[in-house]
Image: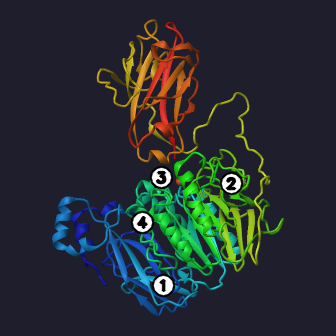
Amino acid sequence: MRLIAGWAIVWMLAGAGWGLASEQSSSKSLSSPAPAEQTNHFARAPYVQLATPNSIVVVWRTEGPMDPVVRYGRSVDHLDQVSTAAVTRVSLTTNKTELARLTKVHPELFRLPKLHSAPFDLYQYEVRLTGLSPDTRYYYGVFDGRRRLTEAEGSYHFVTHPVVGTDRPARIWVVGDSGTRREIQYNVHSAMTNFVAQDGRPLDLYLHVGDMAYNRGRDVEFQTRFFDAYEPTLRHTVCWAAMGNHEGFTSKGTNGVGPYYDAYVLPTRGEAGGLASGTEAYYSFDYGRVHFICLDSHDLDRKPTGLMARWLKMDLERTKQDWIIAYWHHPPYTKGSHDSDREKQLVEMRTHIMPILESGGVDLVLTGHSHIYERSMLIDGAYATPTVAEGVVLDDREGDPAKDGPYRKSAGLTPNHGDIQIVAGHGGTTLRRKGTIPFMRKTIVEWGSVIIDVDGETMHGTMINQFAEERDSFAIVKRGEVRHQRLYNPWQPQNWKPPKAPGEDPGPEPPEDFVTVIPKFSDWTYLAGEDPEGKWTELKYDTSDWKLGAAPFGYEYKESRTVLDDMRGNYTRIYLRHEFEIEHADHLAEIGLMINFDDAFIAYLNGHEVARKGVGKGAGRKAEEIKSHDALRYQYFPLKEFEKYLKDGINVLAIEGHNAGLDSHDFLMDPFLVIED
Ligand SMILES: [Fe+2]
């Protein structure tokens, strides 16, 4: 099945688009075939998706078109079966003249589904292998017509799913918030590889709980921060993904479009078990006696009346499995880098979705988003805000089979019989802890991942750190009939306080991973030497008679870019305004002002006061009790109750800067605005 033969060469000669393709791959030469040892034929190396008991999909990308063929068989050197059943997606030039020409010469190109935002001239092939035997290992090779592109070696293999309902052990790797391309992400991956090699039990499934492609889930970020990083695992183990908020910048659960949806082939029709969801945004599937449910906590309706919750109820009613594992991005319970008592998606997943899952008998909930490892005791019914432990813990022990023994549940699925919550946002980005969820048995601020083993009546969870050391271990055994009592005075973790730096209290720290929304040295509109009339802190205020100047504003401080050399002896206040744009205001965990100042200031967000330092009372010309302060370093001020005032689209930050006296010998206002990455 050769598509548009020779077209790539024509395009290359025309000089359009070719050089824009990914650096990591060599372009396919149509005239001189490369020898098989030269492995870099792919713009995205082959990986497997959507395994079922009888089928699987092999996916890869090349620059320019090819003749996609997958050969497969039961041994490495006997690939006796073949599939060419490819879905081809393309990424075309945006050059209008070139597009017009292509429309005439190669109209067939325009009938192919498009990649959302891949570099031009990339082709994605998704070849479905069908008629496979269940629970069987196959080896495969990717070919361009007759030319082999993958090396003839054993790592290109896959194992089909067992028949649904078969009692077959499952080993699951769980990773979250990993897509940074930092060394740590690679360490966490190799730690898993070493761990499973040591006990000789390979993975069956890989669950990613989201944020796999920082910072905005763009196509190129998927390539470098997900596919390149996990390539050795992805070629033989299916990653069943859940979308994170960072992927949500470019991919939408509402229409299933974006680099995330290009990257994964997910079930929509119950292909791998479970009830058809009709969307890749949320879905379920089965592996042996385990039912898996993946939800989109980011950009879909989370209410009980929403489509997702209604599908979830029906899916739970139908399943006859022994175990239910549910996973998504935003944790219902966390005090890591995020706070489940404060943030909308987290609160809603807790109050709307957890009751449905628990009445369906869920055993384990896996999430990320919060950059930490947190693992609960056996809980049920914790829907209140703020989260408390009293009356929701069913078993307050560690559940460690090597210490105090596993948690116990009745055999099969029982409504509201307790579940374990795991937040696994520790896969590769900066870690953070804000506090303690009172029913978390383990809260560990270390990088790592989680391995879940389900074998018959036992589920065993292990958190391994980046050195493959076991840092947490728990198990659930489901046997006979077990009765729990709700504990009204359960074991409690020690209350955690943020560590204090020695010496003077430095005040709040900015998020370790922040991005600036108003950069340093930005141009601000400002008013100096007079006080504004009316509601000058509001977005719609008319500043046409204000001036424009670059921060920092001041005098006597060398770093001043807008020098206020008329300020001393004449006036003590200046007024600054800067607009900025926010895409998903209700997804923001934190926004704060970084400011180096002398002497005092008040900051406003869209007309509401959100920070104040050194101004005793009043504001503007009525400000009193100005304390003097030297500008020595940037200090961080989280904007108070920003979630009430921040909105999607254009916002305005306004700052009034005060000098302690008319004859003060210096003044500085050097602000910039940051949000948590
Ligand atoms: Fe996240």
Q: Secondary structure at mark 1?
A: loop
Label at residue 548: none
Which image quadrant: the N terminus?
bottom left
Q: Is residue 31 above or below residue 217?
A: below
Task: Indicate the position of residue 470 as horizontal and vertical percent values.
Answer: 74, 64
**Which residue is denoted by mark 4 in the rendering?**
261
- Given contact means CB atoms under 8 Å apart, are the residues at marks 1 and 4 in contact? no
From the viewer's perspective, is the residue at label 3 or at label 1 nearer? 1
Q: Amino acid at mark 4?
A: Tyr
**Which residue is denoted by mark 1 in the rendering?**
55
Q: Quadrant of residue 485?
A: bottom right
Label at residue 215: 3
Looking at the image, residue 134 sits to the left or right of residue 413; the answer is: left
Mark 3: C-beta under 8 Å from nearest atom of ligand 1: no
Q: CA distance from mark 3 to mark 1?
A: 34 Å
**Earlier residue among tags 3 and 1:** 1
Q: Is residue 466 visible?
A: yes
Q: Quadrant of residue 424?
A: bottom right
Specify few, some or many for label 1: CA neighbours under 10 Å numbering under 14, 14-19, or 20 or more. Answer: many
- Given contact means CB atoms under 8 Å apart, are the residues at marks 3 and 2 in contact? no
Q: Secondary structure at mark 4?
A: helix
Q: Amino acid at mark 1?
A: Ser
**Which residue is denoted by mark 2 in the rendering?**
446
Q: Amino acid at mark 3?
A: Asn
- Given contact means CB atoms under 8 Å apart, are the residues at marks 3 and 1 in contact? no
From the viewer's perspective, is the residue at label 1 or at label 2 nearer? 1
From the viewer's perspective, is the residue at label 3 or at label 4 nearer? 4
Looking at the image, residue 551 sits to the left or right of residue 20; the answer is: right
Specify few, some or many for label 4: CA neighbours under 10 Å numbering under 14, 14-19, or 20 or more. Answer: many
Mark 1: C-beta under 8 Å from nearest atom of ligand 1: no
**Earlier residue among tags 3 and 2:** 3
